[in-house]
Image (cartoon, rainbow, N blue to C red):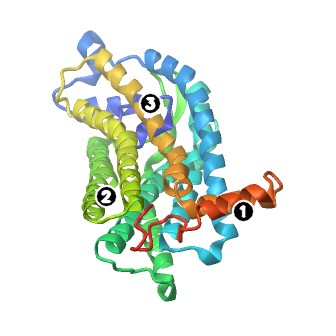
Amino acid sequence: MGDGTADIGHMVFSGTDLEEFYENNSTYDYQNYSESASLTPCSLQQTKAFDQSFLPAFYSLLFVLGLLGNVLVLVVLLRNKRGLQSTDMFILHLAVADILLVLTLPFWAAQAVSGWHFGSVMCKIVGSLFKVNFYAGIYLLACISCDRYLSIVYAVQIYKKHRSHLVHWSCLVVWCLCVLLSLPDIVFFQVMHEYRANMTECQHQFPSHTSTSWRLALTFLYQVLGFLLPLCGMLYCYTHIALTLLRSQGFKKHRALRVIIALVLSFFLCWAPYNIAALMNTLSILQIFARDCRLESHIDIALSVTSGLCYFHCCLNPVLYAFIGVKFKIKFIELLNYSGCICPQFLEKYVKSQARSSTWSESADTSQSGI
């Protein structure tokens, strides 16, 4: 609850929402809720204490690692932009999305400590920026998966050099779709006082008569369009890629298979726990479970921990989508050599040992199906 992301991927009742909920639900009488212990709003003290001790340090670490890793990806790619292939362009946009995402971490860390002190405009910007770049990251990964699927399974090169504009158009469509899906956040994110936590927070504030409907609709949108469909698409693409590589010969292709498995597992392991926690929270809102303050507290803490795991995926992306590419590593070592960090002899020796690779991400050429 101290983490602003807790109001993005899942929907938790704030103090105002409880008032709206009880006022608009004939089963409950909010005016007399204090007479019944079962209807008393649950305290957030345990969740608040956990967020204050866990989130600032964890988010600070992720901010440094994510920012450095993704900025390094940008530097290396832009320094060699004439040689960029389609997957490299998607990786470039993915790095931008990850940078924008980790830039929101200091705001959420500060809110966890002492509440929101950055004003209503920044609340809307930071809140919606999280959602924009969350969708951008996932859809760009889906684009990479589709590109690799077509190039490896069907030997189809959609994004050839003479049609490089298609990559830019694809990225533009992804960003426009992400902004469109984030419009509710731009409209409904507001600064409000959370009386149970006794602090000001940046979170969703929906119209009283449609609060529950909005929350459930956005949860459904997040779960289906933001996770299940992209995940199913990635699993489909990489399953067929794996089968194609297994039928082929050569050590390099089997090495690529291990990389593909790592990519799918990292995506699933980083995002699945949060989506499970968010689903549990949605079921709680729908009163599928008997009201239990201890369960609600555990769900809140689980959402804080698993949302941090989602952010951690931004730190993994530079490793999984760039540094495992042989040619990218060569360009990175060239950059170190240019900066005077290593000796030229080391660069020459390393380049010779990796001379067989022909693409940075090792994914655009069907003859070299590595990643």
> Pointer 2: what residue?
234
Three-letter amino acid code at the position of disc 3: Ser
Marks 1 and 2, Cα distance to the nearest angstrom? 37 Å
Marks 2 and 3, Cα distance to the nearest angstrom? 26 Å
CA neighbours of label 3 inside 10 A, class few (<14), some (14 to 19), many (20+): many
Q: Are marks 1 and 3 in contact (CB under 8 Å)?
A: no
> Pointer 3: what residue?
304
| 156 left or right of 283 in image | right
State the image quarter where residue 335 is shown: bottom right
Q: Residue at x 72, y 62 (%)?
A: 348
Three-letter amino acid code at the position of disc 2: Met
In this rendering, the label closer to the viewer, 1 or 3 = 1
In this rendering, the label closer to the viewer, 1 or 2 = 1
Q: Residue at x 40, y 41 (%)?
A: 270
The mark that comes first in sequence, 1 or 3, is 3
Three-letter amino acid code at the position of disc 1: Glu
| 45 left or right of 151 in image | right
- Give me the disc on residue 246: none
Q: Regarding mark 3 in the picture, which secondary structure is present there?
A: helix
Q: Are marks 2 and 3 in contact (CB under 8 Å)?
A: no
In this rendering, the label closer to the viewer, 2 or 3 = 2
Q: Residue at x 74, y 55 (%)?
A: 346
Give residue 362's position: percent from left, percent from top.
Answer: 48, 65
The mark that comes first in sequence, 2 or 3, is 2
User: Where is 291 relative to 245, above or below?
Assistant: above
Q: Regarding mark 2 in the picture, which secondary structure is present there?
A: helix
Q: Regarding mark 1 in the picture, which secondary structure is present there?
A: helix
Q: In this orientation, which residue lies closer to the viewer: 298 or 181?
A: 298
